[in-house]
Image (cartoon, rainbow, N blue to C red):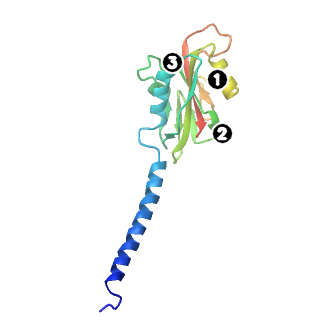
Amino acid sequence: MDSRGQAYSVFKLLIAAIVAVAVLYILLNIIIRVIPPGNNVQDVAAQMIGKQKDQPGQIDTSTSVTFGAGTSLASKALVGSSGLTKEQICLHKGDYVDNETLQVQGSTIMNAGTQNVTLKARVACDNSNELLETITPIEGELYFDTPETAGPESEGVCACDIVSGSTSTQLCCVVILKYA
């Protein structure tokens, strides 16, 4: 027979409970830091465009979102119920211009990497001839290619006529990727 008695088994249970609570605490902290499902850049940017299109000249930045590995941010998918066309939505890599895993392809930015990227989306909408003037004070000078000329080395893609001084006043929105 064990000479330690019944108190020893109670002590073992107490230690096991303390270890279980510590493991649970660590797991909860990890789970809380993970961005909840549905909080991806495509969904958040579409919601922001829906809001910003009614606030020309205003800029809004999201909370941290996920740009999933192997997924894309496409102007066509951002249209949603905004009433805009894919040609009215510009995309720019923003802080990620030197990131080779985020690549511009046509009217899309692809995450060609094997890892998710946590980032923020910044959205601004304005008349096409004023959009660059709206974002330049905050972002600096941004360069866009047309969907026809955009490639993996491009910084951004835009079908809108956003040249300053243009007479076009079509509403255009831009989604710029920012560090989280």
162 versus 8 height, above or below: above
Of the residues shown, which amino acid type is indicated by label 1?
Ile
Name which of mark 1 and mark 2 comes first in the sequence. Answer: 2
Quarter of the image with the C terminus is top right
Q: Write down the residue under mark 1.
A: 135
> Element under label 3?
loop
> Element under label 2?
loop
- Do the CB atoms of the residues marked 3 and 2 lie less than 8 Å apart? no
Marks 1, 2: nearer the viewer? 1
Direction from residue 159 to residue 23 in the image, left or right? left
Tell me which residue sits at (59%, 17%) in the image. Answer: 57
Q: Write down the residue under mark 3.
A: 53
Name the foreground residue: 12 vs 49: 12
Name which of mark 1 and mark 3 comes first in the sequence. Answer: 3
- Give how far across and how far down residue 159 sits, in percent: 56, 19
**C-alpha distance separating marks 1 and 3:** 15 Å
Direction from residue 44 to residue 169 in the image, left or right? right
Q: Write down the residue under mark 2.
A: 98
